[in-house]
Amino acid sequence: MLSFKKFCYGMGFSNSFLIWDDESREAAIIDCGNTAEPIFRFALSEKITVKWVILTHAHYDHVLYMEEYRESFPDAKLAIGMRDEPLLFEVEGNVSYLFGDSRVFDSVDVKLSSGDKILLGESELSVISTPGHTPGSICLYSEADKLMVTGDTLFGGGGIGRTDFKYGDMEIMRISLRRLLSMARWPLEDWIRAEKLILLIKNGETLN
């Protein structure tokens, strides 16, 4: 069974999630928009081993502290959707210029494709390709736990990620949203906003 903790204290009010397998204590961190130290301290106190650091997409407010996470979790693999890695190397692609901090970022260890599995002990997260907000946006889904992290693809209350940035595409976003909604195993009215940037749902109930 998977458990999680949300961390939200950085710029832009984007979330980082620590998701771990209860038995093995193996974990993945989702998105790096918050500094690593509080997550590091929590993982250490709970005897959690971080195996993965996964970026749902390459925008600045989700990747800002990725090098800090590399240093804090040196044994973890840093991953992103295959088609989003090039955006890390481009100011307009990662939209850092919008935050007054035009910069590029380093490459990742693993480039993910739809259908890839992130193994955490006996639990797994499936990678779902959901382009539209960016070309390589991904969601992560646990069928066993009915848990999904949707990055900036889908917000609660029917909101969706912007497609007016460079490389955004509304028509492709519509296809991705239809794919996500076709997977829903819970009433759509339960898709309520958990926070501004990331929706995380488990067992049909919003977890805040």
Image: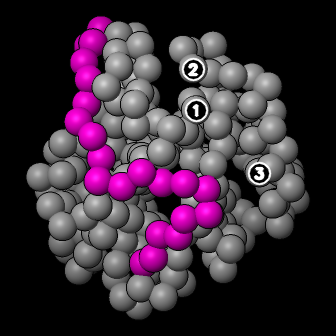
| Residue 100 numbered mark, or none | none
| Residue 167 numbered mark, or none | 2
Dot 1 corresponds to which residue?
135
Quadrant of res 40: bottom left
Q: What element carries label 1?
A: loop
Q: Which residue is drawn at 51% across and 82% down?
A: 123
Q: Which amino acid does label 1 sit on?
A: Pro
User: Relative to residue 143, is residue 22 drawn left or right?
Assistant: left
Q: Which residue is drawn at 34% across and 63% down?
A: 52
x, y percent for residue 168:
62, 21
Residue contact between numbered discs 2 and 1, judged by CB atoms under 8 Å: yes
Q: Quadrant of the C terminus?
A: bottom right
| Residue 180 numbered mark, or none | 3
Residue count near mark 2 (Cα–Cα under 10 Å), binned few <14, some 14–19, many ≥20: some
Whole-angstrom CA distance, mark 2 to mark 3, is 21 Å
- First in residue order: circle 3 vs circle 1: 1
x, y percent for residue 60:
37, 27
Whole-angstrom CA distance, mark 3 to mark 1, is 16 Å
Q: What residue type is labelled 3?
A: Leu
Q: Which residue is drawn at 30% across and 8% down?
A: 100
Is residue 56 visible in this depiction of the protein? yes
Residue count near mark 1 (Cα–Cα under 10 Å), binned few <14, some 14–19, many ≥20: many
Q: Which of 44 and 79 is in front in this view?
A: 79
Q: What element carries label 2?
A: loop
Q: Residue at x 40, y 37 (%)?
A: 85
